[in-house]
Image (tube, rainbow, N blue to C red):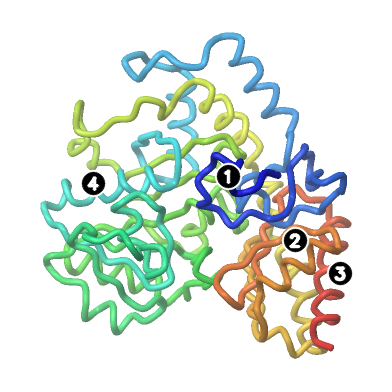
Amino acid sequence: MQTTETNHLFPTYKRWNLTWNRADGSKIYANDQVFLDFMTGIGTVNMGHGHPAIIAAVEEQLHTGWHASNMFHYKSQQQAADTLSQLSGLHNVFFTNSGAESNEAAIKLARKATGRSEIVSFHQSFHGRTYASMTATGQEKVREGYDPLPEGFTYATFNDANELEQIVSSETAAILLEVVQGEGGVNIGSASFLQTVENIAKKNGALVIIDEVQTGIGRTGYPFAFQQYGMNPDIITSAKGLGNGFPVGAMIGRKGLEVYFGAGSHGTTFGGNPLAMSAVNATLSLLNDQLLTEVKEKGRLVQTFLETAQQHLSIIKEVRVSGLMIGLELDCDAGMVVEKLQEEGILTLVAGKNVLRLLPALTIDPQELKQGLQMITHVLKEVSR
C-alpha cells in the first residue's frame, strides 16, 4: 500500500487496510489471510466468487470479441432482455454499465413519458452518484458540496403513506423507491406502505420506479424484491448482482414506454456489450426456483439465529432480514464492529452509523453461513462487555 505522497489515486474511498489477492466461493484472500465474505462486493457477487459457469461464458466471449457498438444486433443482448422481461413481468430493457446509469435512464424516461419534472424519492434512500441519481438520493452527506443540484426532486419519509399523499401531485412524474433501503440502513418497506405508493401514483398519474440495484437478482428470495408484495411498477432498475460483479446494469420498463425511448433519445457506448451480456446470461441461468427457495430458507435461518441472539445481547436493538439482505441495528458504532469482525476473519459492511449490514452470497454453504453468524455474535458479545 502506498503513502499519500506516492499514491496517484483520488482518495474517494475509505479503504480498509487490506490488499485483495483473489477470491472464490464465499472466501476472499487478502494480506495472506482468508476472510469469510459477508459483503460480496457490496451485494454484487450474488452467485459467489469465481462461479465456473460464469467464468466459462465470459472466457468464451473473450475469444469471440467484446465490443462493436450498439449499431449492431447482438443475440446475447436480446437473450438477456428476453430473460429479464420474463423474470420481471415488464417488457423493454435498456442496458447500462451501472446502477447509477440505470437510475439516470429511468428518471429521463419518466420525465419524457409524463411530460412532468418532479421526482419524489425518500429520505435515507440511495440511487447513485451521478447528478440526477445523487440528487434523488435522500442523504445529505452524498449531495454535500455539489450545488447547484438539478431541480425537480422532493423527498418523503419512507414508510409514511400520509406524508407521501401530501407530497405527490399532478406535477409528479414518478415516485422512485427501494423496497428495502440498503445503504440507508436495511429499512424494509411495509406491505401496506408499498401498496399505498402504487395507489397514490395511480391517482396522480405518476409512474412508479423501483430501484432493484441491490435488492434484485435473488437477493431477497425473489427475482426482484417488489414481487413479494404483488406490486406492478412501471420501471425497475438493476445492476450489482446482474452480472455477478461484472460491470453491467439495466433499466426495464412496462410495455408502452418504448415509444418515448426511440432511436437517438438515449444511448451508451459500452452498455449491453457482448462481454457483459455473457456474464448476465450465465448469471440469470443460475437464478432458478431452487436457488430462490434456498435463499428464503437461509434468510429464515439467519432471522431465527439473530433474534435468538438478541435475547441475550442487548447491543442488538433490531434484526432486519429480507432473504439474504440483513441489517442489525446496534447500540454502538457499527464501523467499530466491522473492524473487530475483520480481526476475526469475516468481512461485513455498515449501513449508516449504527447498522451492521450482511450480504452473503446467495450460494453460501449453510455451514459457512452459520460459522459467520457465530463469529458475529461472538464479537458482539465481546463488544458488549
Residue furthest top in the image: 64
Tell which circle, 1 or 4, labels the residue nearer the N-terminal end: 4
Determine the CA span between mark 2 and mark 4: 38 Å
Label 1 crowd bin: few (<14), some (14–19), many (20+), radius 10 Å: many
Q: Nearer the viewer, mark 2 or mark 4?
A: 4
Q: Which residue type does callout 1 highlight?
A: Gly
Give the image quarter of residue 127: bottom left
What residue sits right under mark 2 in the picture? 298
- Whole-Å distance between the Cαs marked 2 and 3? 15 Å
- Amino acid found under the numbered disc labelled 3: Gln
User: Are dots 4 and 3 in contact, CB under 8 Å?
Assistant: no
For the residues marked 4 and 3, what is the alpha-carbon distance in whole angstroms? 46 Å
* SS category of the residue bearing label 1: helix
Mark before the other along the chain sequence, 4 or 3: 4
In the rendered structure, are the residues bearing label 2 and label 3 in contact, judged by CB atoms less than 8 Å apart? no
Residue 241 is tagged as: 1
Q: CA distance from mark 1 to mark 3?
A: 26 Å
Left or right: residue 255 compared with residue 354? left
How many residues crowd around disc 3 within 10 Å: few (fewer than 14), some, or many (20 or more)? some
Q: Which residue is mark 4?
A: 108
Q: Do residues under tags 1 and 4 come within 8 Å of each other at their CB atoms?
A: no
The residues bearing labels 2 and 1 have C-alpha atoms spaced at a distance of 18 Å
